[in-house]
Image (cartoon, rainbow, N blue to C red):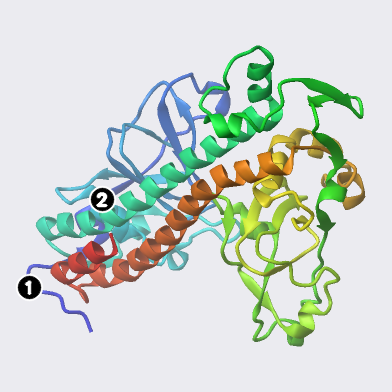
Amino acid sequence: MRDVSSSWLRGKLGDFITLQRGFDLPEYERQFGTVPVVTSAGISGTHAEAKVRGPGVVMGRYGTIGQIYYINQDYWPHNTSLYIKDFKGNHPKFFYYFLKTVNYESHNDKSSVPGLNRNHLHLVEITVPAPEEQRAIARILGALDDKIELNRRQNAILEALARAIFQSWFVDFDPVHAKAAGRAPAAMDAATAALFPAAFEVRDGREVPRGWRVKSIGDVTRVVGGSTPSTQEPAFWEGGMHHWATPKDLSSLATIPLLDTERCITDAGLSQIGSGLLPPGTVLLSSRAPIGYTVIAEISVAINQGFIAMICDRGLPNHYVLWWTRANLDEIKGRANGTTFLEISKSNFRPMLVTVPSASILDAFVEVMEPLYQKVRANLLQTRTLATLRDMLLPRLLSGELRVRAAAALVEGAL
């Protein structure tokens, strides 16, 4: 039962905000600028001109309905969206969260393509707190979203740093070039610098640092694929306890570690997959639709046929394999073929050549990478916890079941 105080207000949605359809803006009419264009799928480009002053709230009106976006700056709402034209004194961020709780499917007025009618939405009966409490609720939920966004940005910086180090050490060979020129390698301690050679040699038709080897990826990792047990057989799926990944599990990831999968399979289902359960630390590459998602599995996982998996038990560490894969995506895609969609096969992938440094340099690389990776992992775990808390608090705060003071204490403890 709701614990709504007498200060809460009842009425129709249109009493509190006015929704307006966005404005058409074909791609060919867009001009270079920094104004976000917000469609039913979110920000989908920029333009030189704004139609609406920010902050604003936009929802998907056509195609993708009910997705809600908060825009801090002036923006252009596309005609596939509805935007709040008038907040009528109500708090914008509060209504961003409030609109997330509406069941839009019940207001869908398009039979073939989903669509929303703003006039129908204006008639929805709602109960909301007064603006002062709206502000407090928005501040609580916003604190969680702000920390989630901070974690996302920090992870992007950490991954960019890891990519730059790999590029410098193993693609551009900066430490080797520096030593060959009689200089100390930049941004590197003396002990690590001493591990790198000071000259190059030709191996298998490519110039590599002296003493390094050139191997195929199939020689230095175990390359395997997966499959899908029959989805018509309940014994393969019902009560499943083994993680089973598809490329869809990677599509929504913004970072490296794979911590969970949408579906699990049973022992019987696992027996249908020749590669079995892959160990934690395996590098996964989506091999089709699309090619190029790459993660390190933090869990034991089985995979479907949309992957190439690299089990790193032959001396080449998974941090190296991950960044090598990302650095060589153009070549990987170039080896793909297919009529319906491009796919890189294991037989085309295994011969790809890898420059293999000395074991001591690989150890030094892992020593640098591991703290970065663990921080990314910790941020991801915290983000999952904060998102769960936010999603638990959201309906309870917006229904009046949970009051601001109790929610604030929960959020303070989580942060």
N-term mark: 1 or 2: 1
Residue 261: image quadrant is: bottom right
**What element does badge 2 sit on?**
helix
Give the residue drawn at x 39%, y 65%: 385
Q: Are marks 1 and 2 in contact (CB under 8 Å)?
A: no
Residue occupied by mark 1: 6
On screen, residue 192 above or below 174: below
The C terminus is located in which quarter? Answer: bottom left
**Residue 87 location (% of width, % of height):** 21, 47
The residue carrying mark 2 is 93
**Residue name at image x 47 percent, y 45 percent:** 155
- Establish if 188 lies above or below 144: above
Inspect the image, locate mark 1, and give the three-letter code of the amino acid beneath it: Ser
What number is the disc on residue 341?
none
Is disc 2 surrounded by few (<14), some (14 to 19) or many (20+) residues within 10 Å? many
Tell which residue pokes out farthest to the top in this image. Answer: 181
Q: How many marks?
A: 2
Which circle, 1 or 2, is nearer the viewer? 2
Residue 69 in view of the camera:
no
